[in-house]
């Protein structure tokens, strides 16, 4: 599951839309979007195979899930709708302790909501060109075609990349230069800053993304995203 590619609503419902299909967030199950009953079929699939979605999120095996075992257990019983007194009796603590835990979860939710709103306001500025061609680009006439907004970037990435295997995979090579540059902005994110890669490391990394790694590497270098030594033995990110 790629959390960055899923909206809050998609996380809550347990599936997302991609390429005219509904994709389960937890397995490879898909239903065609044109099929009228697809949402109901997906909901049935989630319930039967994965169980309640809130339990999947609570137990999600991800570095971003920082809930402790105690917090997970509390969220499970809170989701049951049980009264504080009943929960306290079940867990062997006082009702005041349970009330405090509810309060703590609410405060964390408020913090998360404020942070998310701030993040989206700061980074989702669709009217500003945030993706500029790197200064090291060679023999390129930089014009309006290369002024890529964040909104265009997000839409293009979702259209051309497949994240279902928890890694970046390019479905096909585009013809338009603007689309190519947009995709290169995403590909270069797979390279770490201030790190040098051998020719083999670079080849292996790009092969995982697209079978024609040669064209991918050529465009990364041509547009100034990637640089290399004269002998071609060492590569590094420069954008």
Image: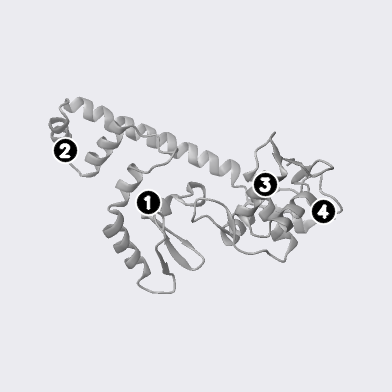
Q: Are marks 3 and 1 in contact (CB under 8 Å)?
A: no
Give SS at disc 1.
helix
Q: What residue appears at the point 65 percent right and 51 percent down from the top-left corner?
A: 206
Q: Quadrant of residue 67?
A: top left
Circle number at residue 188:
3
Quadrant of the drawing holding the C terminus: top right
Relative depth, front residue between 203 and 145:
203
Residue 142: numbered disc: 4
Sequence order check: which comes first, mark 4 or mark 2?
A: 2
Q: Nearer the viewer, mark 2 or mark 1?
A: 1
- Label 2 and label 1: CA atoms lie apart by 24 Å
Identify the residue under disc 2: 83
Give the numbered dot on residue 12: 1
Sequence order check: which comes first, mark 4 or mark 1? Answer: 1
Dot 1, how many residues are within 10 Å of its Cα: few (below 14), some (14-19), or many (20+)? Answer: some
- Percent position (x, y) of residue 82? 17, 41
Q: Residue at x 35, y 72 (%)?
A: 37
Ranked by sequence position, the earlier of labels 2 and 1 is: 1
SS at circle 2:
loop
Mark in the foreground, 3 or 2: 3
Q: Position of residue 184 (x, y in %)?
A: 69, 52
């Amino acid at each position: 599951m790629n959390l960055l590619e899923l909206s809050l609503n998609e996380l809550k419902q347990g599936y997302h839309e991609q390429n005219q299909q509904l994709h389960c967030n937890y397995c490879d199950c898909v239903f065609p979007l044109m099929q009228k009953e697809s949402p109901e079929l997906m909901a049935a699939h989630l319930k039967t195979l994965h169980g309640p979605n809130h339990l999947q999120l609570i137990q999600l095996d991800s570095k971003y899930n920082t809930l402790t075992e105690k917090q997970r257990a509390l969220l499970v019983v809170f989701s049951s709708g049980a009264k504080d007194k009943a929960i306290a009796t079940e867990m062997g603590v006082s009702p005041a302790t349970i009330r405090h835990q509810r309060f703590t979860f609410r405060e964390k939710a408020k913090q998360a909501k404020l942070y998310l709103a701030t993040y989206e306001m700061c980074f989702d500025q669709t009217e500003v060109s945030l993706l500029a061609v790197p200064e090291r680009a060679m023999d390129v006439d930089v014009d309006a075609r290369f002024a890529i907004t964040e909104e265009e970037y997000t839409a293009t990435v979702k259209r051309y990349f497949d994240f279902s295997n928890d890694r970046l995979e390019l479905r096909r090579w585009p013809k338009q230069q603007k689309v190519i540059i947009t995709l290169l902005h995403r590909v270069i994110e797979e390279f770490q800053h201030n790190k040098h890669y051998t020719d083999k490391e670079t080849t292996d990394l790009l092969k995982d993304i697209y079978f024609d790694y040669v064209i991918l590497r050529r465009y990364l270098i041509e547009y100034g995203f990637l640089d290399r030594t004269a002998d071609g033995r060492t590569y590094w990110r420069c954008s």
